[in-house]
Amino acid sequence: MKLVAENIYKSFAGRNRSDSVTALDGVSVAVSEREFVCLLGPSGCGKSTLLHILAGLEFPTEGRAFYSGTSGSLQPSTSMVFQQLALYPWMSIIENVAFPLRLAGVGKAERRQRAAALLTKMQLQGFEERFPRELSGGMQQRVAIARALITDPQFMLMDEPFGALDAQTRVLLQEELLRIWESIQNAIVFVTHSIEEALLLADRIYIFSARPGTIREEVQVTLPRPRTQSIRKLPEFGAMYERIWDVLRVEVERSVNIQ
Amino acid sequence: MSTSSSIHTSKAPADARAKSPDAVSSGTIPLRPVKLPLWIRSGTPTSIWLKISVFVFILAFWEVAARLGWSDDLWISSPAEIWSALVTMTMSGELFVNVVASLYRVGIGFLIGAGIGLFLGLLLGWSKRLEDLLLPVVNALYPLPKLAILPLLVFWFGIGEGSKVALIALGTFFYVCLNTFTGCRIIEPALIKVAAMYKASPLQLWRFVLLPSALPMIMTGMKLAAGYALALVVAAEMIAAQNGLGRMVLLAGQFLQTDKLMAGVLMFGALGVGFYALIDWMESKLAPWRQ
């Protein structure tokens, strides 16, 4: 089964007809089961918009997004980790994590038990009854990931989830995400503007152009797994970094000139 | 000051001093600390005793001034006179009857008005279509002076309790409705998207997302409404009533009973404070995540 976006064209209406903005211009991506894919590009290139289209939260102006190779008519489950985390301030940590189950009508005892197990896995045990604002940014991020994982999604979409964290916390969470992904093996589509992050995490990287977004290049990351931060020391890492930066640099310069 | 400047000079690396032509050991300029305007937001909390003593001082000055004959009893009563009027009215049961009458009107009117306001506010916040259709109507009616409608309300609901309760309900309604609506509108869109991704039903969205998100604004609306409801009950009771604190204050004025009049006003103040505290307490129970 694959999650596919085909020839996506997306424009946003401006105040007048003339100043409508084209965010995506003929973008196609496909994500297989158990694959870790990064969408890498300069800010404002439309990679977040594509992610929202894959989530079904936005609709393409032209083109289509769909699941291919599905068996039966059951809708595959997709979840999303938002850039702003979007934790509910009025729910305790465990209520936040269990919220998707609550909406699905899962009984209180079962959903609490499943949420508690996941929180333990995310090293958040003991914080179940706290409110989000009582937790640090890194811990809130883990809660948001736990909430996305609770429905056992086949596809997990992540919109620059570590963008707001300090560099050290970011490193820890990247490794933790890898550890979890290796244990559950669902597909992840991860939006980032950091080459290092993309190289550390992904099997495959789509490099976006500046706005209007198109795919400049698709890179297969051949670095060995399981990975930790120490893969930075591999000569292949440096080589791939240079190669991607050569492509990206032009686009970043263009996007700076657009804004 | 002198210590800090000496630290700066002594900690400067010797090689840097040697290399840089500007840093020759000629003179030192002391670091001048920036004076922060601390009176804007002083770090030290003001003592509770100091705050109380302001009240005590004003009351004492007031009492002394009255005893010394600086003011006429008719113009303004002394604190002791107001106190004794309060005691007398409490003993005779007069105060109780009137407080209960006013509280009843405010309470029932507030419950009706806040209930309808809450319901309609959430409805408008929930559906953009309903907002487009109904919000202009609410906005058109909102600026009408409520007291001017009292005679009309008397036609509709009679001269008795009905018209007064309706007046207070009407005043309360607008504050709660418009604040609830705003509370629904200022929600972070991602919070709605999360619920939508997991296929929340309209009812679930309303119960788990919109209502709790709007709660702080709802409470603000209720506090504003509480003050307004008290003002309206005074006016309504002065215009047409057999009892109530407003009526009592009006009569006291007509009979030149300044102490009784001021005691009545004081009671209104106490009711307002109590009303406010009640809503604050409700908020702390309903929205524990905000503490």
Image (tube, helix red, strand yellow):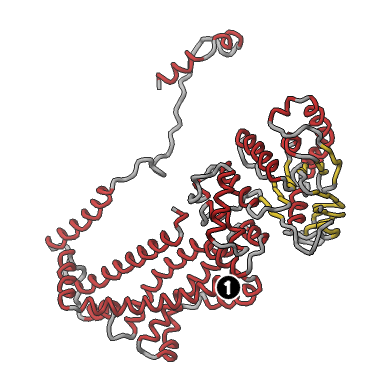
- Of B36 and A133, nearer the camera is A133
**Tag 1: Cα neighbours inside 10 Å, few (<14), some, or many (≥20)?**
some
Numbered disc 1: secondary structure: helix
Position of residue A100 measured from the top left corner of the image (x, y, whole percent): 62, 58
Residue B196 versus residue A244 in the image, above or below: below
Position of residue B195 measured from the top left corner of the image (x, y, whole percent): 63, 60
The image quadrant that residue A111 belongs to is bottom right
Residue A19 seen in the figure: no
Direction left: furthest residue = B68
What subunit carries mark 1? B
The image quadrant that residue B188 belongs to is bottom right
The image quadrant that residue A178 belongs to is top right
Q: What residue sits 27% from the left and 79% below the top? A: B250
Q: In the visual, does A51 lie left or right of A142?
A: right
Position of residue B291 measured from the top left corner of the image (x, y, whole percent): 43, 53
- Of A159 and B5, nearer the camera is A159
What residue sits right under mark 1 in the picture?
B123
